[in-house]
Amino acid sequence: MKKIIYFISLYFLLLTSCKNKPDAGSGETDTPKKGTIYISVDESFKPVIEQQIKVYHSSYPEANIIASYKPEVECFKDLMKDSTRLIIVAKGLTKDERAFFENKLSVPPQYTELAYDAVAVIVNINSKDSIFTIADLKNILSGKKSKTAIMDGNNATSSVRYLQDSILRGASFGKNVVAVNGSNAVIEAIKKNENAIGFVGLSWVGNIDEPKQKEDLTKLRLALIECVKCNEKDMFAKPSQATITFGEYPLARPLFYIFKDDANGLGTGFVNFMSLERGQLIFRRSGLAPAKMSFLKRNGKIKEQE
């Protein structure tokens, strides 16, 4: 009788083990709370995504999200080469890109906005110019004005693409536009040059609770840019959560995730985390405008008892 019970128990144990074993062909080697995944992230979003990963790791110690920060075009190359299942970038998929992945994969990729960011225009704290119209920016970027413009890389970055599309309408940059290696290099260059203008993602300069950013803002400032959608004329705005939310800052842009996996793994868990309250609050704290949840301030009145 004991042998029968033993073999029945062993049978169910083996059956359970077989059901829980990941399918080698599916690539499912993790769960929403543990495992290891590699993701590619647009470098202009590095500060806020590092915060997202830090909090996620503190909540789930067995999770290991390894992020590689690089230009936007390199993130898309990683997605196409199967180097990663998840990228975080400043644009969604075009019709052709969507068709490519649908033909290549059995499951179409998921993508949507997580938050709204901005390309911040920064100048040295001693700069004489800190207020710009859109025409001013166009003249600087096209080379009609000789002011040095410092970008976070060559034509592969999201900031470069955004400014060329939105400000220059596809035209080429002038010879006065120079590239450095990443957003932090832009900030350091502007600190040393009173006659230059720089362009970085807002999460690099928009979080005054972050010690380095607070220190950086003693040596540089955020420029005021013409509000082209305001009802009143001659209105200018700095990049901030409020000016992005209400459409006052003209250089706003979305932050997307693109995910190509139908397995309920670590990638799914991280995307869900960023989309729900805790992740959305991290975007908010970093100065970005959350896309999934509204955190509007409401005034309340309490009637005192006599």
Image (cartoon, rainbow, N blue to C red):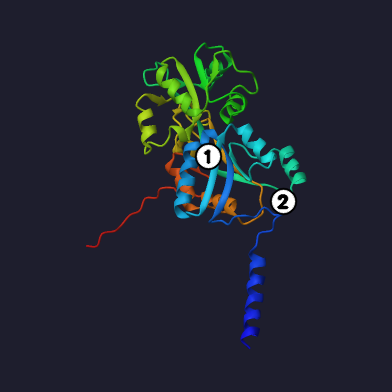
Q: Identify the residue at horizontal 53%, vertical 39% (top origin).
A: 116
Q: Quadrant of residue 76?
A: top right
Q: Identify the residue at horizontal 53%, vertical 30% (top origin).
A: 251
Q: Amino acid at mark 1?
A: Tyr
Q: Residues within 10 Å of mark 2 (few under 14, many from 20)?
A: few
Q: Amino acid at mark 2?
A: Val
Q: Please provide percent x and percent y for residue 107.
A: 72, 51
Answer yes or no: is residue 260 visible. yes
Tell me how far mark 1 sits from mark 2, CA to CA.
27 Å
Q: Please provide percent x and percent y for residue 123.
A: 43, 21
Q: Nearer the viewer, residue 281 or 225?
A: 281
Q: Residue furthest left?
A: 306
Q: Please provide percent x and percent y for residue 259.
A: 63, 46
- Residue 167 located left or right of residue 94: left
Q: Quadrant of the C terminus?
A: bottom left
Q: Identify the residue at horizontal 43%, vertical 23% (top origin).
A: 188
Q: Identify the residue at horizontal 66%, vertical 59% (top origin).
A: 22
Q: Residue furthest front?
A: 3
Q: Secondary structure at mark 2?
A: loop
Q: Which is closer to the viewer, label 1 or label 2? A: 2
Q: Residue furthest bottom?
A: 1
**Badge 1 is on which residue?**
116
Q: Earlier in the sequence, mark 1 or mark 2?
A: 2
Answer yes or no: is residue 292 visible. no
Q: Nearer the viewer, residue 65 or 278?
A: 65
| Above or below 7: residue 137 | above
Q: Secondary structure at mark 1?
A: strand
Q: Please provide percent x and percent y for residue 34.
A: 54, 55
| Above or below 223: residue 38 | below
Q: Nearer the viewer, residue 202 or 262?
A: 262
**Badge 2 is on which residue?**
107
